[in-house]
Amino acid sequence: MEIARRPRVTFVQAWPRSIAHMGAVQSTRASAGPLMPDRPTGKSPHEPTAFADFRDGVVATLPAMAAATPFAFLLGALATDKGLSTLETGLMSALVFAGSAQFIVLDTWQSPAPWLLVGLVTFVVNFRHVFMSASVLRHMGSFSPGARCAALLFLADENWAFAEARAARGRLTVAYYAGLSGFFYLNWVVSTVAGAYVGRLIRDPRAWGFDFAFIAIFIGLIVGFRSRPGFVVTVTASAGTATLVHLIQPGPLSIALGAAAGVLAAAIAAGPAGARR
């Protein structure tokens, strides 16, 4: 049986993600007040119930789940091909829960495992979570300390973006975030385990257009930040840097440096007043 090959992360797939994360910086800068606003008191009689919020969160993340499932299947197949058992494959997704890092680590996996390289690659690829966490944390004023910790533990590109979009329309609640994160997380873990059995049936998700599903999601997220001050400057700096780095050294470094360039551009565009806010 021909072993499935991991689809390489192309620049077209990488740069929308690095730019999308700049919305975190724009969101942080665009809102006044302390990092963690006071919890609201009282509840509007027209405020949705917790179940309605949870349901809305699940519905919002369905497209992202559909796009992630084929890649989770393929990840499971690649993991077993590298010698991991089905249990180890499931635990990897359950404990790491970072698709990009998991694919890249599997690409460098050997026996014995190069732990220092694995740790460095994971750090570089997931460094964007620093910016995402700082952004979404501002909207968690109604979360308890424990709920905030749990929310950040399950933070991913997709649920961060949907949480930011929800916060722009109204209050981000624990129930809504749980709906976003819970099913997306379970879908990733279950699909990875299933992929350990049948993932090789999907030899190339690109042939089915699944790779463009992710691109479309992140382009839509970028456009959603277009009304924020400094949007054009941030996008230009991030895309330009990611392009340059990718041309010199293709790989995950373009994502991290593109995000860092966008952060710097957003801070400069904000000026001293924006920095104080």
Image (spheres, rainbow, N blue to C red):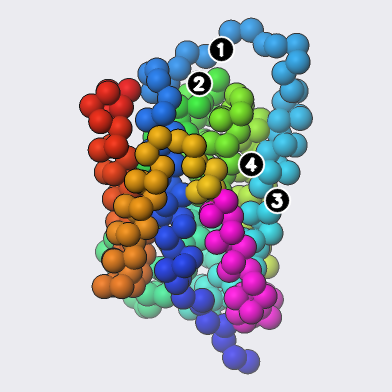
Earlier residue among tags 3 and 2: 3
Does the stretch in magenta take in 219? yes
- Circle nearer the N terminus (2, 4): 2
Q: Amino acid at mark 2?
A: Gly
Residue 238's place in the image compared with 193, above or below, is above
Residue type at tag 1: Pro
Horizontal and vertical percent position of residue 85: 56, 71
Tell which of 108 and 13 is nearer to you.
13
Disc on res. 141: 2
On screen, residue 67 above or below 260:
below
> Mark 3 — residue?
62
Q: Where the N terminus falls, by quadrant?
A: bottom right
- Residue 169: image x %, image y %? 61, 29
Query: Dot 1: within a 10 Å radius of its alpha carbon, few (fewer than 14), some, or many (20 or more) residues?
Result: few
Whether residue 107 is visible? yes
Q: Which residues are magenta?
A: 196-220
**Picture quarter with the C terminus:** top left
Count residues near mark 2 (Cα–Cα under 10 Å), then give few for <14, some for 14-19, many for 20+.
some
Q: CA distance from mark 1 to mark 2?
A: 8 Å
Q: Quadrant of residue 89?
A: bottom right
User: Is disc 1 placed on a helix, strand or loop?
Assistant: loop
Q: Residue at x 37, y 30 (%)?
A: 29
- Label 4 sits on residue: 180
**Callout 1 touching callout 4 (CB < 8 Å):** no
Q: Residue at x 46, y 67 (%)?
A: 12
Pointer 1: what residue? 40
Residue at 31% of width from left, 73% of height from top? 247
Label 3 to label 1: alpha-carbon separation: 29 Å
Give the overall secondary structure of the magenta segment. Answer: helix
Q: Is residue 135 left or right of residue 169?
A: left
Q: Residues within 10 Å of mark 3 (few under 14, many from 20)?
A: some
